Image (cartoon, helix red, strand yellow):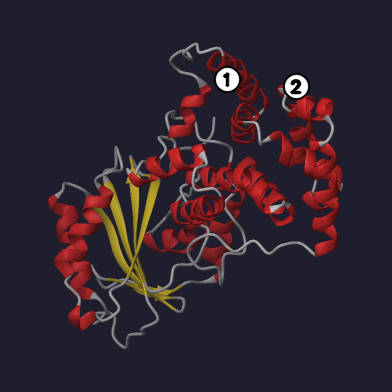
Amino acid sequence: MVKAKNPADLLIALPRILGYTPTNSIVVQTFQSRRTAASLRVDLPPDERSAHPTAVADAIIRLISRVPGIDAVLVLIYTDEEWDQPDRLPHAAVVESIVTRMASAGLGIVDAMCCSAGAWASYLDAEHGVIDEQQTSRISTELDAAGAPHDVVGITQGAQPIAPMPPEQRTEVAEAATAITHDVHERERLWEWPEASTLWSDAIESAPCDLPPAAMAALLWSIRDKAVRDCVLMFLAWGADAGDRASVDTQLLRRGVPVPSGSILETFVGDGRTAPDGLRLEGAVRLLRYLVSLAPRPWQLAPLTMLAWFEWARGQGSAAGDYLDEALSIGPGYELARLFEQLMRTGRVPDWIGRSPN
């Protein structure tokens, strides 16, 4: 995703790769053949004096070991603590334990760095400095092209809360939704992929705020059908052809016929080396968040679960977990959310993380 000339470049890039600015955190950025792969974030021990560095390191290596194919790591400490001398950095004992564990596991150590208020320093050598605007501008240009989230300064880890729209707008969407539920022909029409495909294609190419209440209600109704919902996931991630392929395979499933090996639906569990387009994912997240802000609460289940998947698909597990928790609080038995929760508990990371879209 980023052509880093030095470890400090990755320090600049990481908040946008993550989608938030870590605070009081240990972040381990993994690499596969010099490509950025999964990112792991855990809280810093609240009291450095009573911390157990070996236990922290063991917990992190257990999580990292679940990520297939990694060969190197960058260890970063984000802290509010400042330092007077670069050779006396905070949390040095924890970092030493983590680096030792990683090296013992055969992983290359790109660097181990501390960051506080724009200043940074390496735990491994004498390098230190302050992040400058020229570096930030170059890295930002590359991240823009990759579709990385914008405006992450001040955004902390996890999904940002979705504020509900004003009552009058929600009422308009609710009334349009009620009209659909009372119209048998419209209900069935929106559960056919050709119709739903056109609807979602128009929506993703528009600014969400420009869509009328009837269109919002139609979008929300369409994904109450699980086959259409799965097709929309594939369509938003990989494009129209992927949605059409998913439609063929969901029809097989409805008839009780197993889908062939290599089905596009296998990407739901992270199989496949082709990364979704970053700009498409960002657009999908923006649209789905807007839908949730307008939807009647029972109708938020599908878009929240889809949001969880899209965040996971771009390597943002903390945000994915937040959306999934919200979905399960609404519908504890919602099948897709339950399946995805089980998948995330295994520590599964999509095969395409750290790869560029074809």
- Front in this rendered view, residue 104 or 199: 199
- Front in this rendered view, residue 79 or 223: 223
Q: Are marks 2 and 1 in contact (CB under 8 Å)?
A: no
Determine whether the residue tagged by mark 2 lies in a helix, strand or loop: helix
Residue 102 found in image quarter: bottom left
Residue 112's disc is none
Is 2 above or below relative to 22? above
- Is residue 297 visible in this depiction of the protein? yes
- Residue 275 in percent (x, y) is at 50, 35
Residue 341 found in image quarter: top left
> Which residue of the protein is positioned furthest toward the front in this rendering?
182
Residue at 53% x, 53% y is 323
Residue at 49% x, 61% y is 158
Residue at 83% x, 25% y is 185
Is 267 above or below relative to 263? below
| Image mark count | 2
- Residue 344 in percent (x, y) is at 39, 45
- Residue 135 in percent (x, y) is at 52, 64
Residue that label 2 marks: 194
Left/right of residue 260 with respect to residue 206 in the rendered view: left
Left/right of residue 284 with respect to residue 338 in the rendered view: right
Screen quadrant of the C terminus: top right
Give whichever of discs 2 and 1 has the lower sequence position. 2
Residue that label 1 marks: 250
For marks 2 and 1, give the CA distance.
Answer: 13 Å
Residue at 56% x, 12% y is 255
- Front in this rendered view, residue 122 or 41: 41
Left/right of residue 323 with respect to residue 42 in the rendered view: right
Q: Residues within 10 Å of mark 1 (few under 14, many from 20)?
A: many
Is 215 above or below relative to 230? below
Q: Amino acid at mark 1?
A: Thr
Determine whether the residue tagged by mark 1 lies in a helix, strand or loop: helix
